[in-house]
């Protein structure tokens, strides 16, 4: 058994590290005047001595062993894995844009101008009065937004201890409310998959600080009672929080602010086509109504007689991230919004909803909750949704989100996004239907064409081995 097979199965693909392909001792010159102590300097270093084609092919092969939205459709429901257009990357790669954030405000005018306009774009898109660009992810936006809500209640000497979260909400909603110090009250879904108004009436009280909600909700249904929901929460003195993960369904058509939401986050890596996944960097700007603007994190950007400056909102909750936020992510979101314009954003949401509905129409499976918008929760029925997902991998597509939300049995939460063409939607539908037609043996043994076969997903998430050393085979 060779080194590679010891690490991977006999039939799995393996790419050697560059240092395994070659290791050459190369002499290096040390500076005689170096202030470094002798034991920290050396005369030679071991490096692979390889040609450019060898190195290029190595990295290209590695990239081909992975799956990405540049490879094919990536319909992970709730995640909105849109294709990220390269023009936004070009904007972010402009060397003039890579300025040190500690530079003086006068020398950062261009950067601040972009951030100022992005605050404004996002405020207009969400129907909010003020936006902070600081939080580095959607979850961080939730935490920030709930802290802002808390600061608001405290400023009124209004002691409230609970945040209401629907049972179908993303796990981060529960976590953000708990991290901000609130007791989380779980709201069961109604039989139609929406908020049950009677259950909400029963849950709100003078302890309610906020209700967190996404709309369309986690199975793609529009909460059509949203105005009544807002009234119930507001009458109890609470605030309404909008989880912006599903904003792609409403873009340019409806605004959370107009529905009665007081505070929201935007997942720019979902809605505005900035890269998503791999742990960041991301951005989760937060928008609020005028009443809450004074509590936003610092700094924000404002314009004063033609110049842009950073300032701290009057009763700010403080900093939630370094400097002005994740600039390189934010500038991509800015470029995307500016390029699409109002008409382009409206078109994106129309196509996102159309694509989801076209795809669903072609599937040989049940979709319990309708009418959905940009995503739908199909059910794998008697099959294990994870098996269906593994089988789909052999058809050259990425499977949907599985087994979430939990109230849909064997859920396959599917969101194709507006970026897919009718051909790739048909490929997706064929992959779904092939899995639904497969017998249990075929389902359980899938996938067979991927780089890695069935891995222990829980173990991979809990005990990740992220370095080469960790994977070294033990001596036989
Ligand atoms: C993705 C998502 C979040 C969290 O956003 P991150 O940017 O991944 O932290 C919150 N709520 C919903 C519904 C989501 O889909």
Image (spheres, rainbow, N blue to C red):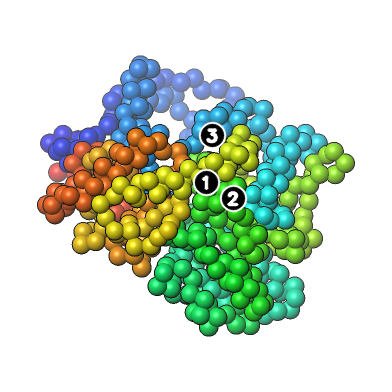
Q: Which residue is mark 3?
A: 37
Image location (x, y in percent) of residue 51: 35, 16
Identify the disc placed on residue 253: 2
Question: What residue is rendered at 42% in x and 53% in y?
Answer: 375
Q: Which residue is mark 1?
A: 349
Question: What residue is rendered at 70% in x and 73% in y?
Answer: 153
Q: Is residue 129 visible?
A: yes
Image location (x, y in percent) of residue 170: 46, 62
Give the CA distance from mark 1 to mark 3: 61 Å
92 or 27, nearer to the observer: 92
SS under mark 1:
helix
Are the residues tagged 1 and 2 within 8 Å (C-beta)? Answer: yes
Q: Is mark 3 within 8 Å of ligand 1?
A: no
Question: What residue is rendered at 56% in x and 22% in y?
Answer: 32
SS under mark 2:
loop
Q: Is residue 24 visible?
A: no
Image location (x, y in percent) of residue 95: 63, 27
Front disc: 3 or 2:
2
């Amino acid at each position: 058994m060779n080194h590679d097979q010891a690490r991977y199965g006999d039939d799995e693909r393996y790419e050697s590290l560059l240092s395994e392909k070659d290791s050459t001792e190369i002499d290096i010159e040390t500076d005689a005047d170096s202030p470094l102590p002798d034991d920290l300097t050396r005369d030679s270093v071991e490096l692979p001595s390889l040609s450019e084609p060898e190195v290029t092919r190595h990295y290209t092969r590695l990239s081909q062993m992975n799956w990405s939205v540049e490879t094919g459709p990536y319909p992970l429901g709730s995640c909105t894995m849109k294709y990220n257009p390269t023009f936004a990357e070009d904007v972010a790669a402009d060397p003039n844009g890579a300025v040190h954030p500690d530079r003086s405000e006068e020398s950062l005018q261009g950067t601040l101008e972009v951030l100022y306009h992005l605050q404004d774009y996002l405020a207009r898109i969400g129907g909010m009065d003020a936006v902070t660009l600081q939080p580095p992810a959607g979850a961080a936006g939730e935490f920030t937004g709930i802290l802002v809500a808390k600061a608001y209640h405290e400023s009124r000497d209004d002691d409230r201890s609970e945040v209401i979260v629907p049972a179908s909400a993303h796990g981060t909603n529960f976590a953000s409310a708990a991290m901000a110090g609130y007791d989380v009250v779980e709201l069961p879904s109604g039989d139609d998959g929406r908020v049950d108004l009677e259950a909400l009436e029963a849950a709100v009280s003078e302890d309610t600080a906020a209700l967190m909600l996404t709309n369309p909700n986690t199975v793609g249904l529009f909460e059509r009672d949203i105005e009544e929901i807002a009234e119930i929460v507001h009458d109890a003195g609470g605030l309404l929080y909008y989880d912006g993960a599903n904003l792609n369904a409403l873009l340019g058509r409806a605004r959370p602010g107009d529905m009665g939401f007081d505070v929201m986050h935007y997942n720019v890596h979902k809605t505005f086509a900035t890269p998503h996944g791999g742990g960041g960097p991301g951005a989760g700007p937060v928008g609020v109504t005028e009443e809450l603007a004074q509590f936003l994190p610092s700094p924000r950007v404002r314009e004063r007689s033609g110049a842009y400056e950073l300032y701290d909102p009057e009763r700010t909750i403080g900093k939630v991230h370094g400097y002005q936020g994740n600039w390189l992510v934010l500038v991509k979101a800015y470029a995307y919004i500016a390029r699409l314009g109002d008409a382009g954003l409206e078109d994106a949401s129309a196509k996102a909803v159309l694509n989801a509905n076209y795809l669903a129409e072609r599937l040989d499976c049940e979709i319990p909750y309708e009418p959905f918008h940009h995503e739908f929760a199909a059910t794998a029925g008697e099959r294990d949704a994870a098996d269906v997902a593994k089988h789909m991998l052999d058809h050259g597509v990425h499977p949907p989100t599985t087994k979430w939300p939990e109230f849909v049995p064997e859920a396959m939460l599917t969101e194709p996004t507006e970026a897919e063409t009718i051909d790739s939607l048909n490929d997706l539908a064929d992959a779904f239907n092939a899995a639904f037609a497969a017998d249990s043996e075929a389902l359980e043994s899938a996938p067979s064409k991927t780089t890695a076969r069935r891995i222990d997903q829980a173990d991979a998430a809990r005990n990740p081995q992220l370095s080469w050393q960790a994977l070294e085979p033990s001596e036989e």
